[in-house]
Image (tube, grey):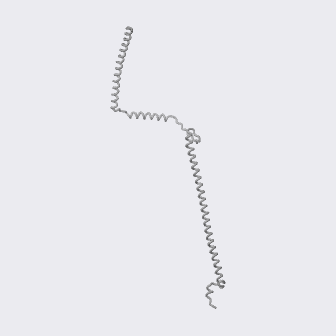
Amino acid sequence: MDKDIMETVLTEMLEEQKQSNLLNGENTQAIMELIKRVSAIEKKQDQQLLSPVSIDSKQIERTVSENTDKIIKIIAEQPKEFVQHKRILLFPEHGAAEYYKLVYGRLFKWIAIFSIACFLCDFGKNYIAAYQEKSWYRDGYEQLLKEKQENTHETKQKARIKTELKNTMRNRPQDTIQNKPPDTIQNRPAE
């Protein structure tokens, strides 16, 4: 290798080294300055945390109330359109599934409940009427049976009385047949 080439390479390397040393020195100085600034900032933050910050809440409240008043005035000044629509919505414009589920689900349920209640009322009326008619017929039938039993008992008594009268009439003497009282026959003087 050639001596001249070596010298040029070494001189270039030496110069680059000097430049890098200079840059390193500047970097260390910049880092030292940044460390000083960070420590100063930290000290200020510590002092701010330790000392209470006086916040004027009345001023904030005043600005907020002024701004809300402005907002209310702006809203009040805007024109308002109120249009009332009175209509029956069988087919709604928005949210049809929820509407049908809500309205017609309840409607069919109440129709079913009403029809069942009407059926039960009608059934109850018919049952009560049938029961009253049945009890009326039963009471009438029982009354007829009672009357029939009384009539048969009376006819039996009348028949028995008639047969007893016939028997007594056959067995009595002739004087009694002539419609004379029985004591006059017995109390007559003997002839």
Q: Is residue 127 left or right of residue 38?
A: right
**In the depicted view, which residue is nearer to us: 107 or 116?**
116
| Quadrant for the N terminus in the image | top left
Q: Residue 162 in the image: state x and y as whole percent.
A: 64, 77
Report the residue at 59% width, 55% height from top: 123
Q: Residue 143 in the image: state x and y as whole percent.
A: 61, 67
Give the answer, above or below, for where 150 lies relative to 185: above
**In the depicted view, which residue is nearer to us: 33 or 72?**
33
Q: Residue 37 in the image: state x and y as whole percent.
A: 34, 24
Q: Is residue 54 left or right of residue 95?
A: left
Q: Residue 121 in the image: state x and y as whole percent.
A: 58, 54
Q: Quadrant of residue 151?
A: bottom right
Give the answer, above or below, for where 93 lies relative to 36: below
Q: Return the residue found at the far front.
A: 1
Give the answer, above or below, for where 15 lies relative to 63: above
Report the residue at 56% width, 44% height from top: 105
| Quadrant for the C terminus in the image | bottom right
**In the depicted view, which residue is nearer to us: 111 or 131?**
131
Report the residue at 62% width, 84% height from top: 182
Q: Quadrant of residue 50?
A: top left
